[in-house]
Each structure stands twice: as structure tokens, then as C-alpha cells.
Image (cartoon, grey):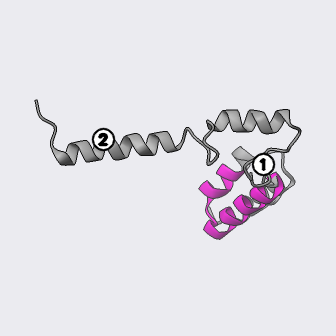
Amino acid sequence: MRISRLSAGVLGAIFALAMADHHSSEGLPIMDGKAKAAESGKSVPSPSVPPARDPSAAVAEEYEAARRKNTAEAYELFIARHGDDPLAEKARADLKRLPR
């Protein structure tokens, strides 16, 4: 069975890309480079992770979405999700004001 030039080229490119993940620019495998930095006392930069979102801001956004919809279903869903939140009382009051 013969491998065409295109197939051989594609396989070669895949292999080259796969191997690029396993070596750092210094020629050492990435994990060895990190381990050496940790042993030498140098700090290893960590990936940047966004700070956690404020839960009360998310609840307030959900309440505002329910108010924009202004339907019994929207208010009931908000109350079911956040029944203990102070905004749930506002949602209950809004729900009572809706025409039946």
C-alpha cells in the first residue's frame, strides 16, 4: 500500500504540531522546565483566571430580566430559583400586580 504525498504531508504536519506541545523553547519537555523553575525558587506564571462573579449581581440581573418580561412565568421562575433572596419579595409583589 502506498501513501500519497498529500497523506504523508498531512501526517507529518500533525506529528510536528503534536510534538510542539511537548517541548519548550529551551528544548526541554514543558513539565521538566516547570519543575526546574519550581526547584530553583523561580515563580512559575499561572494562567490568568478571571475573578469569580458576584452572586448578588447575577441574581439582580435575573430579576431585571423577569421584570422586562413582566409575565407570571418569569416571576415564578425567579422566585423558584431565588426564593430566599430579598429580591424574591419584590418579584412576589410584582406577580400580585399582574392582571389575572
Q: Which residue is mark 1?
A: 45
| Mark 1 crowdedness (10 Å alpha carbons): few <14, some 14-19, many ≥20 | few
In the image, which residues are magenta? Answer: 55-78
Q: Position of residue 38 (x, y in %)?
A: 82, 36
Asked where in the image residue 11 lies, by quadrant, the reply is: top left
Q: Secondary structure at mark 1?
A: loop
Asked if the magenta segment contains residue 68, the reply would be: yes
Q: Position of residue 32 (x, y in %)?
A: 69, 33
- At 75% from the left and 33% from the top, the residue drawn is 35
Q: Please identify, in this view, whether the residue under mark 2 or under mark 1 is nearer the observer.
A: 2
Q: Position of residue 78 (x, y in %)?
A: 70, 52
Q: Which residue is mark 2?
A: 11
> Looking at the image, which is closer to me, 28 or 20?
28
- At 78% from the left and 61% from the top, the residue drawn is 60
Q: Secondary structure at mark 2?
A: helix
The amino acid type found where label 2 is placed reads Leu
> Looking at the image, which is closer to me, 46 or 28?
28
